[in-house]
Image (spheres, coloured by chain):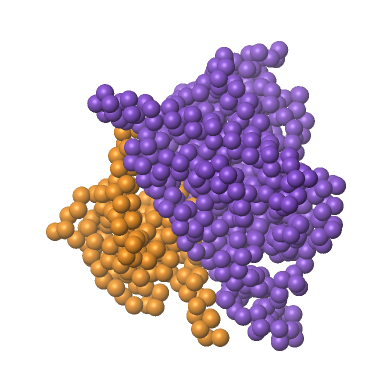
Chain colours: A purple, B orange
Amino acid sequence: MAMLRRFPITCWKNFQVGLLNEQLVFLSRSLHKSAASEALEIPATAEEAMSGRLVQPAAAETDDKQSTVSETRIKSLTEMPGPNTLSNLIEFFWRDGFGRIHEIQLEHTKKYGKIFKSRFGPQLVVSIADRDLVAEVLRAEGVAPQRANMESWHEYRDMRGRATGLISAEGEEWLQMRSVLRQLIMRPRDVAVFSDDVNKVVDDLIKRVDCLRGQQSDGTSVMNVNDLFFKYAMEGVAAILYECRLGCLENNVPQKTQDYIAALNLMFSSFKTTMYAGAIPKWLRPIIPKPWEEFCASWDGLFKFSIIHVDNRFAEIKAQLQRGEEVKGGLLTHMLTTMEMSLEEIYANVTEMLLAGVDTTSFTLSWACYLLAQHPDVQEQIYAEVTQTLGPGTVPTADNVPRLPLIRGLVKETLSRLFPVLPGNGRITQDDLVVGGYFIPKGTQLALCHYSTSMDNENFASASEFQPDRWVRKEATDRVDNFGSIPFGYGIRSCIGRRIAELEMHLALTRLIQHFRIGVSPLTTEVKAKTHGLLCPGAPINLQFIGRENLTDSSL
Amino acid sequence: MALVTAVRRLAQVSLREYSRRRTAVSCWGGWQAAERSFSTGLQPLRSDNKVMVHFVNRDGEKITVKGSPGDSLLDIVINEDLDFDGFGACEGTLACSTCHLIFDEDVYKKLGPVTDEEMDMLDLAYGLTETSRLGCQICLSKSLEGMVARVPESVTDIRQSKDGSS
């Protein structure tokens, strides 16, 4: 399910564009949270820029008398600061910049400011690392915003005769599919009905943790928790998207599923590198054929996996209908029985959701557990909230989550702030805009630098600290969120899987906290983030899961 | 799952409505049509028992319309073809805050509980006030008879007015 979330906008951009955007530089200034209304008001410079959205650049050239009235003079892109092309190439190719995109984003923001340009080959990217400018850009969106140039995705689909899904489609085609899918999986109340399905997967997750730690000599350690959460997320996707279980979390994983896991793991990881395939000009392919070949092979594998499962369900439905039985089911059944989208479109969307929904969720769960282990006091606070709210042993559902504000805060603090799985988002401007005092022509690739804005002290006090309670509202009018932290994006092209991903994470984390005290393993030192398409752990995270039943009852 | 299916069936109806309307109407009109039938599908229509609502648009004009109990304010805007530019972009799926409305304090208190998801989206609303809510989350009831809902100034309007004056 996470799939869903990622697949929307956010996700993807980062992929393909991301690479271009790598520079995603980011950075930021802006107000502080409770200032929601201020945020809305938008600081002077921003407001000016916005108002001048369609202003002709000509008006700008004449008056540059005083820098204090900078908003009256609209600057051109050539005046925008940024790293030069050569140093950028060196940064990325000789200094492993691809793995440090999030750090480069911060560095560039510090060096060049809240808005700057960079070139990646022929691609010009304007990076926006300011909360209020990000808000302006997103609020000015039209009915079918575009994230990035998806040419390589389209080329693959044309070559194989496949349809586009929500990530790769644009314009009218995108709008039609989005309108179908959002009515199915975007409203929190529609997604809440998946609680039971998700909880069955969480049951297996808890059992699996128990089993894994039992295999270690200390009886508590689980090595490389991301491997575990990858299987959890994949099982969750299968449960919702394919309406079947794969058995990823069983002690004896079926051979077929083992093959799937291995293949998908490979695909996800090669995807991140082959995303660069789109950045390599076509004419270079005969000389450097590998990225494109791997890109195609990855897609072949993802499509194959989805098609097998969709076809299985389709065959079951047909058989049921032939027997005159009533057909009941969830998301996939609905899509297959109503055919609001063609079968090819269903294949494409399910495939793109699979791509979007597995490692995004697993990385976030890994980071959340890592942060909990490093902050035992915060963990105890959350544990106290969970036990007080639910009582011992109650299995949480979506209905309980509103009464677990620290669990929501934990996910937000992990995903929105410290480890945004997509460190940057992309947009291609569909109009001429004036942003931050610069004229940005229609068709420009923008990189919205979420990593930088979420780490900005002006947006979040003590930004580098892990404080899930910063998201807890004292009352309904207390404002805590802001554009400095929008991991799922905002608006019509935001992550469609958001609510499903949140449900998967809320239910899994609540239950893990109920069952275990999560501790740092002596086998793990500090783990840093690395950009590999997504922001992922740079080394295996090994943690201890100490059964709560073994603890003294003083904490209860 | 049965519930999901039921919900989806409603969604389907709305989409059909959406595509039907869409050919004749602009994009926004299309979205709104979809939204409307979706919500009305969830609540029985009681045409004899309408609730009066006054909207104040961005130009300060008062527009008085009627809606059925159970309809959301977004439904009404769509049903009545009220022209509030960019209103309800995500069709009430809590992915944006474009159906942001501002209420008088006494009305605000009667609007019922706010969900976390709505609060999160409100945080991202332009021109937020202490008595702001999202129109897609407010359902009409008899006790709201005669309520006033103010459409806040939009980003777009600011742009246009400045453009116009310059």
Q: Within the image, what quadrant is residue A483 found in?
A: bottom right
Residue A41 found in image quarter:
bottom right
Q: Residue A119, can we see it?
A: yes
In the shown orientation, is residue A415 left or right of residue B90? right
Residue A510 in the image: state x and y as whole percent: 52, 32
Q: Residue B130 placed where, x, y %?
A: 45, 62
Q: Which of the image's four quarters has the N terminus of chain B? A: top left
The residue lying toward the viewer, choosing from A398 and B13, is B13
In the picture as drawn, the residue positioned furthest to the left comes out as B48
Quarter of the image that includes the C terminus of chain B: bottom right
Q: How many marks?
A: 0
Of residues A19 and A297, which is closer to you in this image?
A: A297
Question: In terms of depth relative to the viewer, which is nearer, A459 or A290?
Answer: A290
Residue B100 visible in the snapshot: no
Q: Is residue A278 left or right of residue A204?
A: right
Q: Position of residue B117 (x, y in %)?
A: 45, 49
The residue lying at 45 percent from left, 43 percent from top is: A345
Pinpoint residue A425: horizontal percent, then vertical percent.
62, 53
Give the residue drawn at x 57%, y 69%.
A431
Q: Is residue A76 above or below residue B131?
A: below
Above or below residue A191? Residue A433 is below
Residue at image location 64% in from the left, 47% down from the top:
A15
Looking at the picture, does residue B33 appear above or below residue A499? below
Q: Tell me: A47 left or right of A287.
A: left
Give residue B143's quadrant in the image: bottom left
Which residue: 84% across, 58% down? A86
